[in-house]
Image: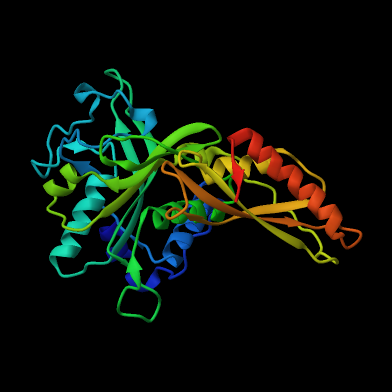
Amino acid sequence: MIEEVARHTGFDRIGTELPPSSLSGEYHSTERRKRALRRSLSALGFDEAINLSFTELTNAFELIPEFVGVSENNLVTLTNPIIEEASRMRQTLLPGLLNSIRHNINHGIRDVWLFELGRLFAANEPGVLPREREALALAATGGMVNADQAQAERELDFFDLKGAFEAGVAAMNLPPLEFALAEAAHLQAGQAAAISFRGVHVGSIGRLAETIAGQYKFRQPIFVAEVDLTPLLETEELPVLYSPLPRFPSILRDVSLLLERKITVAELLREVHDEKVEHFVDARFVGTYEGKGIPEGKRSVTLRFEYRADDRTLRDEEVDEIHWRLVKALQEKFSAEVR
């Protein structure tokens, strides 16, 4: 009908500019955070994957906490699917990413780093719209390839994926994630961790279990992670604070502690910050040592402490007093020995 009116009126009489409008388009409130997340992961070498929202039924993967306990009756099923094997709305992003990795490996690309942002679905009672959650998933395999280099310098590991998650959350200007040793149905035992945000479990990270890797015919380690992104997008951003550059130098002190292997570096750093000692600036992880001279079941962890005063240069005696107060607190809390 519009074409007929235009033809009779004359195409040459129709203006080329858009009609005036009193409304203006704008991004969704979460779009700016998602763009910051995408830029951060891309800068780390990840490529974004976009897979179908439809998938085949699979019980091999542990779902995000919001969907834990969802049964086959809670799946959103299409009545007239385009592809017979993809008749359900996805409840996890991982199968799509693993299929993408397999496709790349089959074409001779061994080093693959992928991430995906997308929605997950779970059915409610009849007559109620399905539940939807925003999710982020990462999957990587192969080596760590630096810019302008054709060959990987080393094989990637768990901490590469963990660091990518932490960098992405920092880019969104949100509180840091927390990681704790855990088990997941689709992850290798002993190489898996639960991801928490502000004390709430939101996902998991680790090495893909051998049973699932065998189903995809992977012959190299695959590291995967998935989190429920909805609570992160709903959280208020941290305020951006500025301060002048320090006028006085910092003083550094290193300490090596002999600890039980089950004690994490995150626990040590949390305890140090909770002490709230005057002139204490920060503490960082330096490294660990296991081997000759270290008892079985233990390891040596080295931390670096930074101290600084805003109005003067600290004396060594002052720093020693503050430093050993923190060290003694760690000794008492974790039954640690100073090496």
Residue 177 in view (yes/no): no
Note whether 46 is above or below 89 in the view shown: below
Query: Viewer-proximal residue, 70 or 212?
Result: 212
Residue 230: % across, % down: 46, 38
In this figure, what is the number of numbered marks?
A: 0
Along the horizontal axis of the image, is 309 left or right of 144?
right
> Residue at coordinates 44% horizontally, 65% vertically from top-left?
44
Q: Is residue 44 found left or right of 107 in the rendered image? A: right
What residue lies at 39% left-to-right and 66% top-to-bottom? Answer: 45
Camera sees residue 205: yes
Q: From this view, report whether residue 3 is shown above or below residue 149.
A: above
Q: Is residue 201 left or right of residue 108?
A: right
Q: Residue 102: percent from the left, percent from the top?
A: 17, 57
Q: Which quarter of the picture shows residue 210?
A: top left
In front here: 52 or 319? Answer: 319
Return the residue found at the far left. 84
Q: List x then y, in percent, for residue 42.
A: 42, 64
Question: Quick one: which residue is furthest to the front in this view?
Answer: 293
x%, y% of residue 168? 49, 54
Does residue 131 sit above or below 268 in this rendering? above
User: Which residue is situated farthest in the right direction here?
Assistant: 311
325 lies above or below 255: above
Give the colouring mode of the picture: rainbow
Q: Residue at x 85, y 53 (%)?
A: 318
